[in-house]
């Protein structure tokens, strides 16, 4: 992403100091789903973007949270997060009705290419929210039937899986568990986990994606693009999978951030550019990058 694009994007970030918590529910594995009334963010957010959220009025440092869903009409933004430290522990204690400061939407979103109408969304752990946002965006454009999602988790999913009724040829027998929300949207979805979840494929998201990609003929495979978000090792595997089949892949990176608006340069990563390797800021130059620029093939 060029510097001018990142600089112009910073003018679209809004500060809402009184974003009210309207829902806040705990799920297994120290996971929480948070819904905030933040109309400025909701009206502008795009799949792949995130916010920098105040977790508690007594904590000076914010935390970056990927956006899971938005409703621009009702003015709310939804997040899934996992408690992993002081900030998210404090956030988990905030009750419905509490007002927090939210800065967003931030970052370069996913890009959709008309020549690649078959979209495979790969999400792992707290990398699942951007995939849900992207799936929602695609179904609102009437593209649910051309969208497929594989979601993985090593802890219980923050929803009750159920057997899918949407056929997905090319997948191994027994991989039938799905996310009800995506199923109801008409998006083919399957789950993976090594945590012995009934109906989930016992492996990684890339392990389940590979046989489907291999089952496609050359014409169909030429219409596929991959989108991924999750831990570093998963994204590296997704980039390798895309390279294996000669497919484009966009990855949304997760990095620790201090300012989240490009000022501190604390979230830089090495990215290949036509001019050579450059250090790019995940917050404003990303978080979405072309996979091969961050994880170059061997």
Image: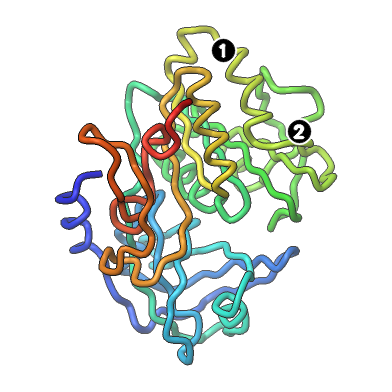
- For the point 43% across and 15% down, the residue is 222
What x and y, as percent, mark residue 281?
32, 55
- For the point 14% across and 50% down, the residue is 4
Q: Is residue 15 left or right of residue 154?
A: left
- The front one of 17 and 207 is 207
Residue assigned mark 1: 216
What x and y, as percent, mark residue 83?
64, 70
Of all residues shown, which one is farthest toward the bottom? 58
Please tell me how crowded label 1 is: few (under 14), some (14-19), or many (20+) other residues with Cα within 10 Å.
Answer: some
- The front one of 284 and 265 is 265
Is tag 1's residue or tag 2's residue first in the polypeptide sequence?
A: 2
- For the point 44% across and 41% down, the residue is 251
Q: Which mark is residue 182?
A: none
Residue assigned mark 2: 176
Q: Quadrant of residue 291?
A: top left
The answer to whether residue 59 is above or below residue 200 is below
């Amino acid at each position: 992403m060029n510097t001018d694009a990142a600089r112009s994007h910073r003018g679209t970030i809004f500060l809402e100091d009184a974003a009210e918590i309207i829902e806040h529910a705990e799920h297994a594995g120290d996971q929480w789903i948070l819904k905030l009334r933040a109309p400025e963010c909701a009206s502008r957010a795009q799949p792949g973007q995130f916010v920098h959220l105040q977790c508690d009025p007594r904590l000076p440092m914010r935390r970056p949270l990927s956006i899971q869903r938005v409703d621009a009409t009702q003015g709310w933004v939804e997040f899934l997060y996992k408690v992993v430290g002081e900030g998210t522990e404090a956030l988990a204690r905030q009750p419905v009705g509490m007002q927090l400061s939210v800065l967003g939407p931030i970052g370069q979103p996913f890009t959709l290419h008309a020549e690649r109408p078959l979209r495979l969304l790969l999400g792992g752990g707290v990398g699942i929210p951007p995939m849900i946002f992207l799936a929602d965006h695609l179904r609102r454009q009437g593209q649910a039937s051309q969208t497929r999602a594989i979601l993985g988790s090593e802890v219980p999913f923050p929803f009750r899986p159920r057997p899918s009724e949407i056929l997905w040829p090319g997948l191994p027998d027994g991989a039938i568990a799905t996310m009800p929300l995506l199923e109801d949207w008409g998006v083919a979805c399957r789950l993976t986990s090594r945590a012995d979840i009934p109906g989930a494929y016992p492996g990684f998201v890339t392990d389940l994606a590979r046989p489907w990609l291999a089952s496609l003929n050359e014409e169909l495979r030429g219409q596929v693009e991959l989108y991924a978000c999750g831990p570093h090792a998963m994204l590296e595997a997704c980039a390798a999978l895309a390279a294996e089949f000669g497919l484009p892949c966009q990855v949304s990176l997760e990095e620790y951030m201090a300012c989240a608006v490009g000022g501190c340069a604390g979230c830089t990563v090495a990215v290949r550019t036509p001019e050579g390797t450059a250090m790019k800021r995940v917050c404003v130059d990303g978080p979405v990058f072309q996979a091969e620029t961050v994880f170059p093939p061997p």
